């Protein structure tokens, strides 16, 4: 479910989480509200009053592009309010613009005092998540300075860190006053004359300028900002007569709507990035509210799902990740030469190395997924120019897999839990996610099953590029040989004879981590299993302990480690299911493709055609609607791209 009680607006790396009245309260914890850009909250208080009273909500704020709400001051049946408040709020390029209209309800003019209480706390998102850590903010300074048309909030730290939030208004406020007991909060006041049966109007702009960010574009009216965003969305999503998706004639109910919703979300979630030569790109940001930035794994899988329909996402993602590929050893942030980045943060805590995530490399799977997408893009588009351009980065990525990734020493891609960053460095990256049957966390170095499949696929695909694009047949033969050896030992070491299923992982002692987990479904997609073993895995994932009726669970129910509300030990993730559906299609399991696709599309229908990041593991027999996971992000990129993966799987199998 979306954070907050009102809408979430997203555009170009900026997002706003609003209340039902269009306001912002400064919440922290699981559902923070505010205006956010580059990992910082640039607006933490935004409360409208009329004649000193917070008006009631007649129509709660709603909208995908323009949040509109209707408010009214107190009144009775015999003495209805003298005026009604109409609010329209739209995001621009680094700013929030709002139109407030007081519409008179009487046949004589009335006077009103409208106030906006505003503050900017510049809180880093890692602070807002309440992760129980304390961060050193000594030397930080926060100020509020009135201006002729509003107020400027500033946040500085050291000699070279400065962020600003600027609030301007047309007409200018009559007064800008401090708020009792608050350090920087200010109330902007306007004395308005509302004509008889007429309206008085304000146009407000809140501009977010984080440290080091480009200057936001010029502000425009809400109407112009909304029109600009709609044009940008249409350019990406296509229209009824141009860019429409190739839906099969017998497409299941809900597929078209889910694909359209997913494309619109992907358009909104794109964030700016730079390529290897400094070129400006737009790549999938992972999701709102916590992850609106470049995440390697998320962007790569999102781009894989969208590749047949929007290949430009893959091209941008590959270029951005090539530009941020590791070049040196930095233990604090997990950087190693050739390693593909896990996430990039721009906030204060990352900049001052109080968290390792400014450019964090703690991912075991982003590097092989980079290689698989590079070849997949060349095959899907027929254009090898990008693969030729990124040959040096591809070679560095392969070198990392063997050298630091562990293929040479252990025969598998492995990771060691990071005390400063992530305990687990596969997609199930929460603490305790890689667990034995009894629920205990495996200890490293850990080799998770799906990463070995990705590594196998990366070797096979890179061999193809080496042979057909880079003209290096000898290296191609070496890579093919390494892939074959990995496939052979994987089945020997990971397959569990008792449950007739792959282990979730191997721990640091080489023991099979024996939980039955959805990661096995990724092995069908990568092709590391032979046909017979792939078929057995695919059929097993459709048994009731795995398949909830909505989706396949991350951990099969009934195991000691299972919990339907655990982030990675019992919930269901649409993107996880997307990889599995593509794997089922590769294995030729058409009926199973349709079954899982039907469950996911039904779940999307219960969420306004939008799949959330994650759902609770309860099944259809527990509740007639999919039960939300309490902290799910929405919109979220790889969930948004999941319907596109479903479409591909259905087309490939004719299901």
Image: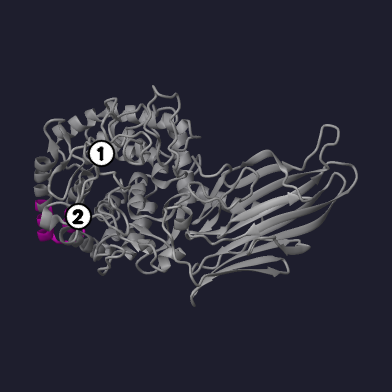
Foreground: 522 or 260?
522
Q: Position of residue 621 (x, y in %)?
A: 39, 22
Q: Looking at this rendering, what residue extends furthest in the bottom direction? A: 159
Closest to the camera, between mark 2 and mark 1, is: 1
Q: Position of residue 46 (x, y in %)?
A: 64, 54
Residue at the image point whose x is 36% and y is 52% from the top = 299
Vertical relation: 253 (above or below) 175: above
Q: Position of residue 320 (x, y in %)?
A: 36, 61
The residue singled out by tag 1 in the image is 439
Vertical relation: 170 (above or below) 229: below
The residue singled out by tag 2 in the image is 462
Foreground: 514 or 639?
514
Provide the secondary structure element on which disc 2 rests. Answer: helix
Quarter of the image with the C terminus is top left
Q: Looking at this rendering, what residue extends furthest in the right direction? A: 108
| Quarter of the rendering containing residue 283 | bottom left
Decide if residue 413 is on the left or right side of residue 186.
left
The mark that comes first in sequence, 2 or 1, is 1
| Quarter of the rendering containing residue 105 | top right
Provide the secondary structure element on which disc 1 rests. Answer: loop
> Which residue range is magenta in the image?
463-481
Q: Is residue 93 magenta?
A: no
- Residue 182 numbered mark, or none: none
State if disc 1 and disc 2 touch (CB < 8 Å): no
Query: Is residue 171 visible to the viewer in this orientation of the structure?
Result: yes
């Amino acid at each position: 479910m979306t954070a907050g009680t009102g809408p979430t607006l997203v555009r170009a790396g900026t997002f706003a989480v609003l209340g039902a009245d269009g306001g912002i309260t400064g919440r922290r914890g699981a559902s923070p509200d505010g205006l956010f850009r580059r990992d910082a909250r640039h607006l933490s208080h935004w409360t409208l009053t009329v004649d000193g009273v917070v008006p009631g909500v007649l129509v709660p704020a709603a909208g995908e592009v323009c949040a509109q709400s209707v408010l009214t001051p107190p009144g009775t049946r015999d003495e209805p309010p003298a005026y009604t408040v109409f609010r329209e709020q739209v995001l621009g390029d680094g700013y929030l613009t709002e139109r407030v209209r007081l519409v008179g309800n009487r046949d004589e003019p009335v006077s009103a005092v409208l106030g906006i209480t505003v503050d900017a706390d510049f809180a880093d998102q890692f602070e807002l998540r309440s992760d129980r850590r304390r961060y050193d903010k000594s030397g930080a300074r926060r100020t509020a300075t009135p201006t002729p048309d509003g107020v400027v909030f500033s946040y500085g730290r050291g000699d070279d860190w400065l962020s600003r939030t600027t609030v301007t208004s047309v007409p200018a406020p009559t007064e800008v006053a401090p708020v009792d007991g608050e350090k920087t909060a200010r109330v902007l006041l306007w004395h308005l004359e509302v004509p008889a049966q007429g309206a008085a109007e304000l146009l407000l702009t809140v501009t977010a300028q984080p440290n080091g960010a480009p200057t936001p574009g010029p502000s425009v009216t809400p109407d112009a900002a909304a029109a600009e965003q709609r044009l940008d969305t249409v350019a990406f999503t296509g229209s009824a007569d141009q860019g429409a998706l190739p839906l099969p004639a017998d497409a299941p109910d809900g597929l078209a709507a889910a694909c359209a919703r997913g494309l619109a979300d992907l358009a909104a979630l794109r964030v700016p990035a730079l390529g290897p030569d400094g070129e400006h790109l737009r790549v999938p940001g992972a999701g709102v509210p916590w992850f609106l930035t470049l995440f390697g794994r998320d962007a790569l899988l999102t781009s894989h799902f969208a590749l047949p329909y929007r290949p430009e996402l893959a091209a941008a993602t590959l270029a951005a990740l090539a530009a941020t590929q590791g070049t040196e050893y930095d233990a604090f942030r997990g950087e190693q030469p050739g390693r593909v980045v896990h996430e990039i943060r721009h906030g204060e805590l990352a900049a001052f190395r109080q968290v390792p995530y400014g450019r964090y490399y703690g991912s075991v799977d982003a590097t092989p997924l980079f290689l698989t997408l590079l070849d997949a893009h060349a095959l899907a588009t027929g254009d090898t120019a990008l693969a030729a351009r990124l040959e040096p980065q591809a070679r560095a990525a392969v070198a990392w897999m063997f050298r630091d990734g562990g293929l040479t020493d252990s025969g598998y891609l492995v990771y060691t839990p990071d005390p400063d960053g992530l305990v687990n460095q596969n997609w199930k990256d929460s603490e305790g996610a890689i667990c034995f049957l009894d629920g205990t966390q495996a200890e490293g170095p850990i080799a998770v099953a799906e990463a070995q499949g990705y590594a196998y696929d990366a070797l096979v695909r890179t061999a193809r590029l080496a042979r057909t694009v880079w003209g290096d047949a000898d290296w191609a033969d070496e890579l093919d040989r390494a892939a074959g050896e990995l496939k052979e030992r994987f089945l020997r070491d990971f397959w569990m004879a008792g449950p007739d299923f792959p282990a979730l992982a191997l721990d640091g002692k080489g023991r099979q981590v024996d939980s039955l987990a959805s990661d096995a479904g990724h092995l069908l997609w990568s092709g590391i299993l032979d046909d017979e073993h792939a078929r057995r895995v695919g059929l097993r994932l459709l048994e009731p302990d795995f398949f909830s009726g909505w989706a396949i669970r991350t951990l099969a129910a009934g195991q000691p480690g299972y919990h339907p509300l655990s982030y990675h030990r019992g919930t269901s993730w649409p993107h996880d299911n997307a990889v599995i559906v593509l794997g089922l299609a590769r294995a030729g399991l058409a009926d199973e493709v349709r079954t899982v696709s039907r469950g996911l599309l039904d779940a999307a229908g219960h969420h306004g055609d939008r799949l959330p990041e994650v759902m609770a593991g309860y099944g259809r027999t527990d509740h007639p609607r999919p039960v939300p996971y309490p902290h799910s992000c929405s919109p979220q990129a790889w969930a948004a791209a999941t319907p596109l993966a479903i479409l591909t799987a259905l087309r490939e199998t004719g299901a």
